[in-house]
Image: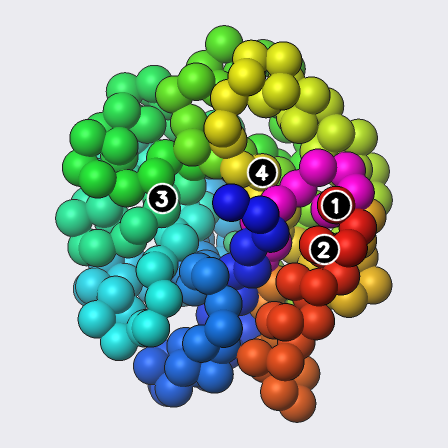
Amino acid sequence: MGIQIAPSILTADFARLADEAAKVSNADWLHVDVMDNHFVPNLTLGVPVVESLVKAAPMPIDCHLMIEDPDRWAPGYVEAGASSVTFHIEACQAPIRTAREIRAKGARASMALKPATPIEPYEDILSELDMVLIMTVEPGFGGQKFLDICLPKIRRTRDLVAKHGLDIWIQIDGGVSAETIERCAEAGADVFVAGSAVYSADDPNLMVEKLRTLAADAS
Ligand code: DX5
Ligand code: ZN
């Protein structure tokens, strides 16, 4: 599939989400951060807003669920029209069942790891997934500093995916910018979420292309 860029609307203007999505029409995905004020200390949006974004955005929706009990709620985001749904393994009781439900309803299933969560315990369930999201900041807020200590985990995840001969994308989220994206691509990531780097740029679409080129050249 190659390099993909997924701008996060977390740092966009929430009163003008359709316009903000249109500003990044070159992007492969629109990354939508769902936060419940329990799993993370921040509150954003839920199913009704995702439903509207699916209709308004020119690209598919990539839902990142930073919520408790994703086993219960994740299928509803597929029904809302999201093309990819990511649950946090730290909050998940039945990741195999949840991933299978997401896939059965027609979306890509993805598992997210917070910075201190290792990939190794989940080697045996990788075949149930379409993507692994490796957080490079503590989840909850945009604009945080990229954590270099997560780079070895990206490498180890890429090695495990290769070892099992799987076709799994590795997504990076948090502090991704023109300064940090090459390190992640070199380590084996191929899907890049960028919030503040894209939405604080004078031309968000141009930044999407810049990030894509930097990642492609480093991978
Ligand atoms: C943080 C969210 C990210 C956030 C990234 O918990 O999951 O998607 O929007 O923002 P930046 O790119 O500014 O770190
Ligand atoms: Zn996110």
Q: Specify whether 67 is left or right of 204.
A: left
Furthest residue to the top? 124
Quote the CA–CA distance across marks 4 and 3: 14 Å
Query: Which circle, 4 or 1, is nearer the viewer?
Result: 1
Quote the CA–CA distance across marks 2 and 4: 13 Å
64 falls in the magenta region = no
The magenta segment is 185-193
Q: Position of residue 173 (x, y in %)?
A: 61, 51
Q: Is 213 placed above or below 133 here?
A: below
Closer to the chain start, of discs 1 and 3, is: 3
Amino acid at pointer 2: Ala
The image quadrant of residue 61 is bottom left
Closer to the chain start, of discs 4 and 3, is: 3
Closer to the chain start, of discs 4 and 1, is: 4
Mark 1: is the Cβ under 8 angstroms from ligand 1? no
SS assignment at label 4:
strand
Amino acid at pointer 1: Ser
> Image quadrant for the C terminus?
top right
Q: Label 1, on which residue?
A: 219
Which residue is at the front of the view, 71 or 134?
A: 134
Q: Label 4, on which residue?
A: 170
Closer to the chain start, of discs 2 and 3, is: 3
Q: Is 216 placed above or below 11 here?
A: above
Question: For the point 60% across and 52% down, which residue is it?
Answer: 3
| Picture mark count | 4
Q: Label 3, on which residue?
A: 85
Amino acid at pointer 4: Ile
